[in-house]
Image: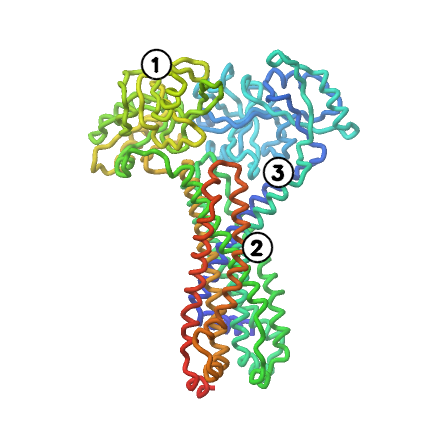
């Protein structure tokens, strides 16, 4: 019998296969959005709900972080009321060489932290090879992910790693380290940390200190004990103090609930749409249901019939959501920089997705009991004499869906305006073809730095390479540094700076008034036209003082490449031979993809495959700040499109049902003299009211959300023009969705309708 119901339900859905597929796809997008947010919420909750969270404290120093010598003093003293003193540094990146069991020397670029032996127990991190902890500064613990990457299935305990660059950690004299254990990976906690060294080797790095408050001690007593420990800092005497590390307020919880609510909007809209679609089809088949009851079908059978249709739709949406998840993660890995990309284990995400699928089935099972109860008394006679009721519940659901659509459309438009205001006006004298023909090479490892001269020689020997530029920083938008300049009135303002070889201006087609000095001209600077205007106001001619150092002005240029001039009065360029980025201009007509492949092959002759390479076209913004911004824009646009599709489907199915079910009424009205415009008003008035109410609620929410950004760029959305654009855009969408059906019902032939009845 169940198999029979599955066949009947599938046959009914296939009658409206396009509508069913779009509904399932939109629901799948909602499931994915909600799944990702739920996954991060669960991982975040694990970090927040560590054992003894109410006793966890953080020890701080006034206006600064701790240094190694200060932390050692804390460890050496017995502080009453403080247990399990835990120390950790901030994340840093360095290059190491792994000497495995086969005595192979494998270089890796890693992320690391400095910690003490209490770090793992305090953070509830499980050690995978016994309980051995680092006991000396020359011992290290590896993350499980890095151990698998570097050693495969071999046991790394007892092997040696060493720093590739002796100066990678300032003042550190230890270069070789013995692996003593491996720690499990723990979701969002330290996702990019590969090695845990002793904090003692990091003399000049900022450290954080945590611990437990003793059970019989209060925070005030502990702080009195800490006041006996003092240091001299800028001629002031400072002492450490403790505070609870767990958040005592509800701000974070409110933010989490807000994010969860926004992520659930598409899921709710999709669920409403397809539930309404299924139940609406079920009501439209009431003659069939009545016949089934006459043939002996019970309420249980009717319930199973409707449940199987729900099961098919949600199952298809669930399978589609798995594919959407794969696509989304692949796109995120392409456009989000690797150092910012969180770990997204598919197995854990799929488990959350399965839980949401089961929850949706349960919710829908409860929801469909309502139409089943209404159909208990259905009969052939009731189908002939039944009265039409107003669809209040349906109208409320359409109002909610339309409000969600306006929210996402408004958010997408507002975010695009903010990004355009921030980055869209960046100065770029190059054409898109010229940007495509410039190849960027980042010196990101010690091995590359050691072999940079032969690498450059081989690349410059390529026939298509016609020009080279050396830079300290990246040319990509948002990568400039900022320094301060003191004006004549003693107020401080910011200027954007860049540093590289003076061929910068010719290489990037930037207009320059002055001369290009050769090599590194210490104590000289080029200034932009905007900065020059400020210098003229301050009566500065030949020399300018920037952050206490005097520079001779040797030229004026238009702007820096990709300069946005947000919160700055101009820019400056410092001639230098210090290199971190190299740019190679290719001859016009060159196959850029082939050239990137050839440059990569040259680099691989000197850099092993275990180390990453960053070779890309200047026009390629993937793995950059702009790539992340683009990913955000695309995600918002997809959510807006999905919400609009859901509204269109919902309104179209509603107007279709209305026009079909009220044909006889309209025919009688036309016989009694109703004009086509009166008939149009009968149907259009309800949708107009729904639209106006939805806009009146959703638009102010979007506006308040965007205006809450504490930034000067909100000026672009303070006007009402973009609100007018949203109003008429969504109004046009609603009009086009309903116009055809209303036009058809306006021009029906009453005689044909009465004859058919």
- Disc 1 is placed on an element classified as loop
Which residue is tagged 1?
Answer: 542
Q: Residues within 10 Å of mark 1 (few under 14, many from 20)?
A: few
Residue receiving disc 2 = 356
394 or 130: nearer the eye? 394
Q: Of discs 3 and 1, which sits in the foreground?
A: 1
Q: Is residue 237 left or right of residue 203?
A: right
| Residue 505 visible in the snapshot | yes
Q: Residue furthest top?
A: 235
Q: Residue at x 50, y 33 (%)?
A: 192
Q: Please tell me which residue lies in front, 298 or 433.
A: 433
Reply above or below: 576 against 335. above
Q: Taking 342 as reference, is 33 above or below it?
A: below
* Marked residue nearer the N-terminal end (2 or 3): 3
Give the percent coordinates (x, y) of residue 245: 66, 32
Q: Nearer the viewer, residue 118 or 463?
A: 463
Cα–Cα span, label 2 and label 1: 68 Å
Tell me how far mark 2 sits from mark 3, CA to CA.
Answer: 22 Å
Number of other residues with Cα within 10 Å of mark 3, as a class: few under 14, some 14 to 19, many 20 or more: some
If you read the primary sequence from the N terminus, does the residue marked by circle 3 or circle 1 appear first? Answer: 3
Q: For marks 2 and 1, give the one nearer the viewer.
A: 1
Q: Residue 121, position in %: x, y?
A: 65, 31
Quadrant in the picture for the N terminus: bottom right
Whether tag 2 and tag 1 are in contact, CB under 8 A, the answer is no
**Pointer 3 residue:** 47
């Amino acid at each position: 019998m169940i198999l029979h119901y599955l066949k009947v339900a599938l046959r009914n859905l296939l009658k409206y296969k396009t509508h069913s597929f779009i509904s399932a796809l939109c629901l799948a997008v909602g499931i994915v959005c909600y799944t990702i947010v739920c996954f991060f919420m669960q991982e975040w909750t694990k970090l927040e709900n560590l054992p003894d969270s109410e006793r966890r404290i953080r020890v701080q120093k006034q206006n600064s972080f701790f240094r190694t010598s200060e932390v050692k003093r804390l460890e050496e003293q017995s502080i009453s009321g403080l247990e399990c003193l835990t120390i950790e540094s901030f994340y840093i990146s360095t290059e190491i060489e792994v000497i495995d069991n086969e005595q192979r020397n494998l270089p890796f670029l890693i992320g690391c932290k400095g910690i003490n032996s209490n770090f793992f127990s305090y953070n509830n991190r499980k050690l995978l090879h016994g309980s051995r902890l680092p006991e000396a500064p020359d011992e290290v613990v590896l993350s499980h992910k890095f151990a698998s990457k570097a050693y495969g299935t071999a046991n790394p305990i007892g092997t040696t790693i060493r720093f590739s660059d002796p100066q990678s950690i300032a003042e550190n004299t230890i270069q070789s380290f013995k692996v003593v254990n491996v720690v499990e990976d723990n979701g969002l906690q330290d996702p990019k940390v590969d090695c845990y060294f002793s904090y003692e080797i990091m003399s000049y790095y900022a450290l954080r200190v945590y611990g437990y408050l003793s059970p019989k001690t209060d925070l005030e007593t502990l702080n009195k004990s800490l006041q006996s420990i003092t240091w001299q800092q800028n001629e002031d005497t400072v002492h450490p103090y403790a505070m609870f590390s767990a958040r005592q307020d509800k701000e974070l919880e409110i933010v989490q609930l807000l994010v969860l609510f926004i992520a659930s909007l598409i899921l709710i809209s999709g669920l409403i749409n397809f539930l309404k679609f299924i139940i609406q089809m079920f009501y439209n088949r009431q003659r069939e249901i009545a016949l089934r009851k006459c043939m002996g079908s019970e309420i249980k059978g009717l319930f199973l019939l409707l449940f199987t249709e729900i099961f098919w739709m949600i199952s298809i949406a669930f399978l589609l959501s798995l594919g959407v998840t794969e696509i989304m993660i692949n796109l995120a890995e392409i456009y989000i920089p690797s150092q910012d990309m969180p770990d997204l284990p598919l197995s854990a995400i799929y488990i959350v997705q399965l839980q949401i699928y089961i929850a949706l089935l349960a919710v829908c099972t409860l929801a469909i009991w309502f139409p089943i109860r209404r159909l208990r008394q259905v009969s052939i006679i009731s189908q002939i004499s039944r009265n039409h009721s107003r669809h209040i519940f349906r109208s409320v659901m359409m109002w909610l869906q339309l409000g969600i659509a306006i929210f996402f459309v408004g958010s997408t438009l507002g975010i695009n305006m903010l990004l355009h205001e921030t980055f869209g006006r960046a100065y770029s004298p190059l054409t898109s073809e010229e940007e495509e023909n410039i190849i960027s090479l980042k010196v990101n490892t010690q091995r590359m730095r050691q072999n940079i001269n032969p690498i450059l020689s081989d690349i410059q020997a390529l026939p298509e390479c016609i020009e080279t530029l050396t830079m300290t920083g990246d040319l990509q938008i948002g990568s400039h540094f900022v320094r301060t300049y003191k004006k004549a009135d003693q107020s401080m303002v910011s200027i954007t700076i860049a540093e590289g070889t003076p061929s910068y201006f010719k290489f990037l087609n930037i207009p320059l008034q002055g001369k290009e000095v050769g090599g590194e001209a210490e104590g000289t600077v080029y200034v932009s036209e905007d900065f020059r205007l400020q210098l003229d106001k301050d009566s500065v001619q030949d020399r300018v003082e920037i952050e206490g150092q005097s520079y001779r002005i040797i030229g004026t240029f238009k702007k820096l490449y990709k300069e946005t001039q947000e919160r700055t009065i101009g820019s400056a360029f410092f001639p230098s031979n210090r290199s971190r980025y190299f740019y190679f201009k290719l001859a016009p007509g060159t196959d850029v993809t082939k050239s990137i492949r050839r440059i990569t092959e040259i680099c691989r002759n000197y850099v092993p495959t275990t180390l990453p390479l960053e070779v890309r076209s200047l026009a390629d913004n993937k793995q950059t700040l702009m790539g992340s911004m683009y990913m955000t824009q695309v995600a918002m646009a997809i959510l807006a499109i999905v919400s609009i599709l859901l509204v269109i489907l919902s309104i179209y199915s509603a107007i279709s049902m209305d026009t079909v079910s009220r044909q006889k009424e309209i025919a009688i009205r036309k016989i009694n003299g109703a004009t086509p415009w009166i008939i149009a008003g009968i149907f259009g008035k309800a949708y107009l009211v729904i639209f106006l109410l939805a806009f009146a609620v959703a638009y102010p929410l979007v506006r308040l959300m965007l205006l809450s950004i504490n930034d000067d760029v909100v000026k672009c959305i303070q006007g009402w023009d973009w609100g007018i654009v949203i109003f008429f855009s969504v109004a046009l969408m609603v009009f086009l969705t309903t116009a055809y059906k209303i036009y058809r019902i306006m021009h029906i032939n009453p005689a044909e309708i009465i004859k058919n009845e």
